[in-house]
Image (cartoon, rainbow, N blue to C red):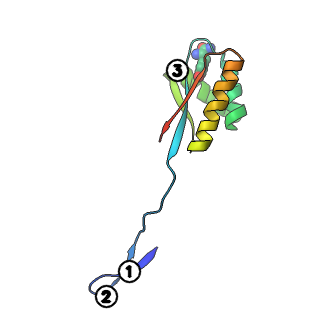
């Protein structure tokens, strides 16, 4: 923290605005066709989740329609979305993954 003096000569603490990069939520969307195990696999493979965490998020998406999988910098979020979309497309599943500013 910076020290500065006010008009009475009393040292006060100021909080200089620190710049933080904007963060992006990566979300998975539900559909009627992508197999549950495939979604679990994606969550383990691209988001480093263990099987229990992956299964839980998959079920949340299945029940609620969508869920946030993680929050990342723009570049990392973009990469995750591209990896998921590419992997799903290659396996001919309609799974959708999107990102949005946090
Ligand atoms: N609803 C799919 C099914 O019943 C499972 C599913 C879960 C699909 C999550 C997509 O992001 C998703 N097979």
The answer to whether the residues at label 2 and label 3 have Cβ atoms under 8 Å apart is: no
Whether the residues at callouts 2 and 1 have beta carbons within 8 Å, the answer is: no
- Does the beta carbon of the residue at mark 1 sit less than 8 Å from ligand 1? no
Secondary element type, mark 2 = loop
Residue carrying label 3: 63
Q: Position of residue 72 (x, y in %)?
A: 58, 43
Question: Counting residues from the N terminus, which is met first, the one under dot 3 or under dot 1?
Answer: 1
Front residue (pair 62, 31)? 31
- Identify the residue shown where x is 69% and y is 34%: 46
Figure check: 31 above or below 86: above
Of residue 34 and residue 85, the one placed in the foreground of this image is 85
- Whole-Å distance between the Cαs marked 2 and 3? 61 Å
Disc 3 element: helix
Q: Residue furthest bottom?
A: 9
**Image quarter for ligand 1:** top right
Toward the viewer: 57 or 39? Answer: 39
Lateral position of residue 34 relative to residue 10, left or right: right
Residue 92 as seen in the image, left or right of residue 69 = right
Per the image, the residue denoted by label 1 is 4
Q: Percent x, y for residue 33? A: 61, 11
Numbered mark located on residue 9 in the image: 2
Rendered view: 3 above or below 18: below
Depth check, mark 3 against mark 1: the one in front is 1
Q: Is residue 64 left or right of residue 9?
A: right
- Mark 2 → mark 1, Cα distance in angstroms: 9 Å
Q: Earlier in the sequence, mark 2 or mark 3?
A: 2
Pick the residue in front: 14 or 57.
14
| Residue that sits furthest to the left in the current view | 7
Q: Is 77 rendered above or below residue 95?
A: below
| The image quarter in which residue 7 lies | bottom left
Rendered position, 98 above or below 23 = above
């Amino acid at each position: 923290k910076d020290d500065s003096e006010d008009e009475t000569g009393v040292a006060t603490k100021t909080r200089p605005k620190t710049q933080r990069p904007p963060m992006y939520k990566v979300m998975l969307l539900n559909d009627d066709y992508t197999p549950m195990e495939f979604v679990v696999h994606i969550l383990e493979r691209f988001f480093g989740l263990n099987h229990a965490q992956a299964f839980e998020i998959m079920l949340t998406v299945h029940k609620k329609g969508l869920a946030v999988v993680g929050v990342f910098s723009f570049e990392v979020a973009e990469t995750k979305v591209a990896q998921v979309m590419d992997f799903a497309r290659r396996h001919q599943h309609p799974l959708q993954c999107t990102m949005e500013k946090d």
